[in-house]
Amino acid sequence: MNKIFITGASSGIGMALAREFSHEDVRLGLIARRKDLLDRFANDLAADVYVYPADVGDSLVMRCAAEAFIQSVGVPDVVIANAGISSGTLTSEVKDQVIFEQIMRTNVLGMVHTFQPFVEAMKNRGSGTLVGISSIAGFRGIPGSGAYSASKAAATAYLESLRVELSSSGVNVLTVCPGYIKTPMTDLNPFYMPFLMDADRAALSIRKAIINRKHFHVLPWQMSIVGFFLRLMPRCIYDLLMRWAPRKPRSL
């Protein structure tokens, strides 16, 4: 794995993944909207870094970035669709409809826009790994976070579809479902976050999952147990337990 393309690389898990993969023989393609942050971060990495300021919600810009990376270093070995946004949302609030659209466009379509330019080239080569960062929040609908939960449930379903489509091509598709990871996104949460994990430890865990060619990875491991019971829990019990759950702030 010496050619790696990562979106959402200017903070959080994306930044930690870039650090985790940064070695002298690695060529990194880093995508984020904030070019100034990307440039400063790239200067501190040991890898050969290619910076592309882009919004993953824009398919044309993402295609240009992907084509530029391929022309510079070749087809990547690993593509990580990590870019994502989160906010508390309420369907009853008119102004939250714009936020719903932003979250769905970034978290779902942004993943499609990230992978699409690379899929055929990886299939033709017969190797590669596509990694989508979803979330345990997509296992069940979280009150007050309807847009985020819906986007991550959609991302998980999309990645499963893609995995089966590419199952005989040599291209692996890995769905990553983090629990609470300490990032600027979770720093806004005004409630207790069980099993909170450092972003650098999360990046190491994801790297191991990529190396082992896993198809589905929940982290930290405690959250795989939580997720298992969440998915099995009857609706009536889930509704009762979550009625008074703390809500994520409406911040976007």
Image (spheres, rainbow, N blue to C red):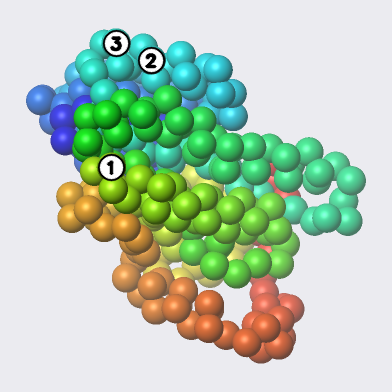
Could you tell me which residue is drawn at 53 percent across and 78 percent down? 230
Q: Quadrant of residue 20?
A: top left
Q: Quadrant of residue 137?
A: bottom right
Near mark 2 (Cα within 10 A), the count class, few <14, some 14-19 or many ≥20, is some
Q: Quadrant of residue 233?
A: bottom right
- State the quadrant of the C terminus: top right
Q: Is residue 196 above or below residue 111?
A: below
**Which kind of residue does numbered mark 3 sit on?**
Gln
Label 3 residue SS: helix
Could you tell me which residue is drawn at 24 percent across and 49 percent down? 210
Q: Is residue 27 above or below residue 115?
A: above
The answer, for residue 199, to whether it is visible in the render is no
**Residue under numbered circle 3:** 71
Q: Nearer the viewer, residue 189 or 222?
A: 222
Q: Earlier in the sequence, mark 2 or mark 1?
A: 2
Near mark 3 (Cα within 10 A), the count class, few <14, some 14-19 or many ≥20, is few
How far from the left and from the top, in percent, is residue 31? 42, 25
**Residue under numbered circle 1:** 169
Q: In the rendered structure, are the residues bearing label 2 and label 3 in contact, judged by CB atoms less than 8 Å apart?
A: yes
Q: Nearer the viewer, residue 57 or 170?
A: 170
Comparing labels 1 and 3, the label whose residue is closer to the camera: 1
Comparing labels 2 and 1, the label whose residue is closer to the camera: 1
Q: Is residue 110 above or below residue 146?
A: above
Horizontal arrangement in the rendering, residue 7 relative to residue 69 (left or right): right
How far from the left and from the top, in percent, is residue 188? 58, 51
Query: CA gap, disc 2 to disc 1?
Result: 21 Å
**Residue under numbered circle 2:** 67
Q: Residue furthest left?
A: 25
